[in-house]
Structure formats: structure tokens, C-alpha cells
Image: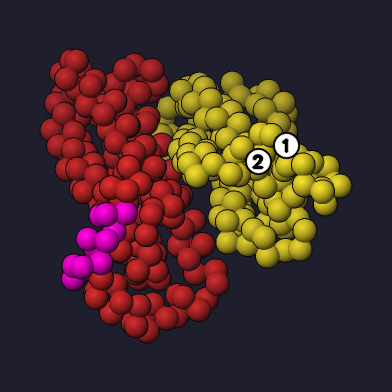
Amino acid sequence: MNPASTSLWDKIEYSTLGTTIAESTWMFPTLETIHVICLVSVLGTIFVVDLRMLGWTSNKFAVTLAAKDTLPWTWGAFVGAAITGGLLWVSKASDYMHNPYFLLKMATMALAGLNMMYFHFMTWRTVEHWDKDATMPVAVKVAAALSIILWLGVVFFGRAIGFTLGIFGS
Amino acid sequence: MGDLLYAFTEWLRTTWVNNASLAISDWKLALWLDTHFWAIPIMQCFHILAISAAFGAILMMNLRIFRLAGTDRTFAETERRYVRWVWWSLLVLLISGIGMTIAEPVRELVNPVFWIKMPLVVVAVLVSLWFHGRVMRRLATGGTAGPVIKTVAVFIIILWCVIMLCGRWIAYAPV
């Protein structure tokens, strides 16, 4: 235990798990690699559904089928990204919690989650009326556009963290 | 493994690559990219978004071969939906990749992992050209996906994962 570690984030960072990852030469890059492959799969599959919802691609096929084909992969990859991301966070918890881009990334992901939940619980209830339409209702297009914009933000803030970690006082 | 890669780096330093990377770092564009803090992260974002579009499209096409996705479509329809995203994404990957190399020529070019990644990219492009030019077209006209085609489909996914692995490890190569 580091003598100066008084905050919760320091305690997490100096836990056995945190120091094991931080002190290993290969664990952090390996976790990052899995994180990248998972997030690439999340984005790739989400965009397939978003583009259909915008009415830009696959217009003659049902939205429900596009969702059914992609969602197991999106969620599987998201769980992988969340686990690896959590482990990366533990190893430098204090630095991440003091980094504005990390906090912005988490906030943007929360907004993407809210957008998804509103779409799933509200807009999706009428899906049988527009499932096979070439042109989607405005609420569907807005949800898809928000999804794309928010995930672009998540990627940018995620990359920004790597360039600014440790330059903000902790 | 680390020693082997380090020996590779040492060897790269004795080749023309070393001088070439130093020459590139004197380019006006290289200096501009190097002195603008957000240039490299933004190029990396384009690189990540393009590999996402390409990998997502490849995944959906290969899942179709295993009848795990897109079963409401024919092979021809699946191909028409996704294959152009692979090629356009590769163009964006190439441009952003060249940009990132110009911005940090020594870090990229005098790097063993970079030179492992590049042949793998060439293999991936050649396999994809064959796969989408011949195999998918034959399936589109009514053929069935046998064990060879299914094996290649899995191989392509693994190959792209290894390419992503190399991309991440460029930053951690022993130099």
C-alpha cells in the first residue's frame, strides 16, 4: 500500500489487482488489445443497425432482423470491452478519475445508453408498423443519428485519454 | 520474443528504413502534424472507425456463410450490402495509416511490429480480393459453402484480429 494513498481511487489503484496489472510488462497492452478488438466489434455491429434505421442501407430488409443478427455480437463484445476496460481502469484508477476525457467518455457512454433505452422502451413498441418500411419515422432516425454521434464521441474521448493521462494533477 | 523483436529493431536501424524515416520527419507535413497536438489522435480515430466499419462488414458477411446472420438475404444481397464498406474502409485505413506514419516516421518505420503488421495487411487484402471476387460470387450464383470456404471465413476474422493486435503493439515494441 502506498503511504500517500488516501482516496478511494488510490486504494483501488494500489490494490493487488491494480499493481499486478500496472507492474506487468504485458498485461496492460494485452488488455488494451482485447479492448480494441471488442470496441471495434461493438461499433461495427451498431453501425449496421443505425444505418438501417437511418434508411441508408438494407432498406428492403426488416429492422427487427438486422437487430436480431447483430445484437448478440454487440452485447458479447460490449461485455468484453467493459471487463477489459474495467481492468485497465483499476491499474491507473486515480489518473483516470482525474482525466476530463475519461469522465467525458463515461458521460457520453451513459448518454448512448439512455438513448438506447429510450429507443428500446418507447420507440420500439410500434416497430411492427415501420419494421419493413424504406423510410423510418423521425424518432427512429433521431435515435440512430444520436447513436452514431455519441459513439464517435466515445472513440474520440477514448483516444484522447491515451494522450493526456497523467498531465492532469492527481 | 522480446529479444527477437529487439534484434529486429537493431537490424532495421542498419537498413535504408532508418534514413528514410529521418528524412520523412523533416517534411513540412511531418513537422505540422507533430506540432499539432490533436492531429495524431484524430487520425487514430479515423483509423479505428474505418477498421470498425470494415470488421463489422466482414463479420456480417462471414456470419452469413455460417447462417448465423442475414438469413433473410441471399449471398448476392449480403455481398452487395457489405463488400463496398470493406474497400472504402481500407482506403480510409490506408490514408490515415500513411498520415500516422508521416507524423511519427521513426516510431512507425523503425519498429518490428509495424513490419510484421504490413505483410499481414497485404495477405488480408489478397485473401479478401480472392474471397469476395471469386468465392462470394460463386455462392451468390447458387453454390454452397463447404468446409474450405468456412475455414477461410474464420481465418479472415482471426487474421484481422491479429492485425489489430499488431496495430496496438506498435506502441509497445521494444525499440
Q: Is residue A106 visible?
A: no
Q: Which residues are magenta?
A: B6-16
Q: Which residue is drawn at the image coordinates 22% and 26% (left, top)?
A: B152
Q: Quadrant of the N terminus of chain B?
A: top left
Q: Is residue A136 left or right of residue B109?
A: right
Q: Which chain is yellow?
A: A
> What colour is chain B?
red
Mark drawn on residue A15: 1
Where in the figure is residue A22, as x and y percent of width and height?
60, 44
Sort mark 2 into few (<14), some (14-19) or many (20+) by Cα contacts within 10 Å. some
Q: Which residue is drawn at the image coordinates 43% and 43% (left, top)?
A: B52
The secondary structure that most of the magenta stretch takes on is helix
Q: Where B134 falls versus B2 (above or below)?
A: above
Question: Would you say the residues marked 2 and 1 are in contact, meaning their CB atoms lie under 8 Å apart?
Answer: yes
Judging depth in this view, the residue of B157 and B5 nearest the camera is B5
Q: Which residue is drawn at the image coordinates 51% and 62% (left, top)?
A: B41
Please tell me in which quadrant of the rendered image residue A114 appears. Answer: top right
Q: Quadrant of the C terminus of chain B?
A: bottom left
- Give the amino acid type for the residue marked by disc 2 in the picture: Thr
Q: Where B66 falls versus B138 (above or below)?
A: above
- Give the amino acid type for the residue marked by disc 1 in the picture: Ser
Where in the figure is residue A97, as x and y percent of width and height?
75, 50
Color style of the picture: by chain
Is residue B9 a member of the stretch shown in magenta?
A: yes
